[in-house]
Image (cartoon, rainbow, N blue to C red):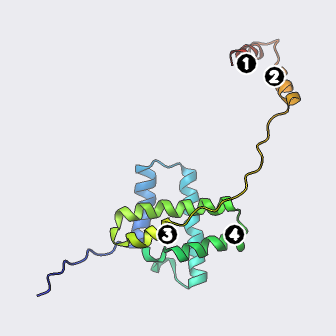
Amino acid sequence: MNSAKPQPPKTDFSSLLQRYFCDYLRQQRNASQETISSYRDTFRLFFRFTERQFRKMPSSLTLADLDAPQILAFLEALESQRHNSVRSRNLRLAALRSFLRYAASQEPSALASITRALAIPVKRFDRGPVSYVAREEMTALLNAPDRTNWSGHRWSNARHDV
């Protein structure tokens, strides 16, 4: 007699993704609509990429399809084919990472694959120099309020408190 413990059924990828968006992002994390839209767009792009590159329909994807090599190929395609900036690429990676962290808590059997995907680093990029307002521009801004009326006078007094 086989005494091996039966494995729980694998979570359906589509229902996992739906719970991530509806339950986790909206209700538990209270994510903004802009964040949810950005994450949704990431998955749309990922699904199109997977369909084109690997001939796999979104409806047949599994959690195992979100492995490190496939995610890296997707990120490379964003930069080379879609001409996305490194910042945009990193935002797409952040969306995938967020989902994978959620998936790890829901599907512990996929933890090894998820851990490898989560280890993908963000890509470094050069930040432009921080520009400041020139002294002449600052003076012009401070002199801009019309001190002959109440709101201009109030603003003028408030700036002295700073």
Disc 4 element: helix
Q: Nearer the viewer, mark 4 or mark 3?
A: 3
Q: Residue at x 49, y 69 (%)?
A: 117
Q: Which mark is residue 79?
A: 4
Pointer 3 residue:
117
* Relative height, residue 142 to residue 2 (above, below): above
Residue at 81%, 13% in the rendered image: 147
Q: Which residue is mark 1?
A: 159
Residue type at mark 2: give it: Leu
Q: Residue 27 appears at what percent x and percent y? A: 41, 50
Circle 1 SS class: helix
Q: Secondary structure at mark 2?
A: helix
Q: Which residue is mark 2?
A: 142
Three-letter residue code for mark 4: Glu
Q: Are marks 3 and 1 in contact (CB under 8 Å)?
A: no
Disc 1 marks a residue whose amino acid type is Arg
Q: Which of disc 1 and disc 3 is earlier in sequence?
A: 3
Question: Do the CB atoms of the residues marked 1 and 4 lie less than 8 Å apart?
Answer: no
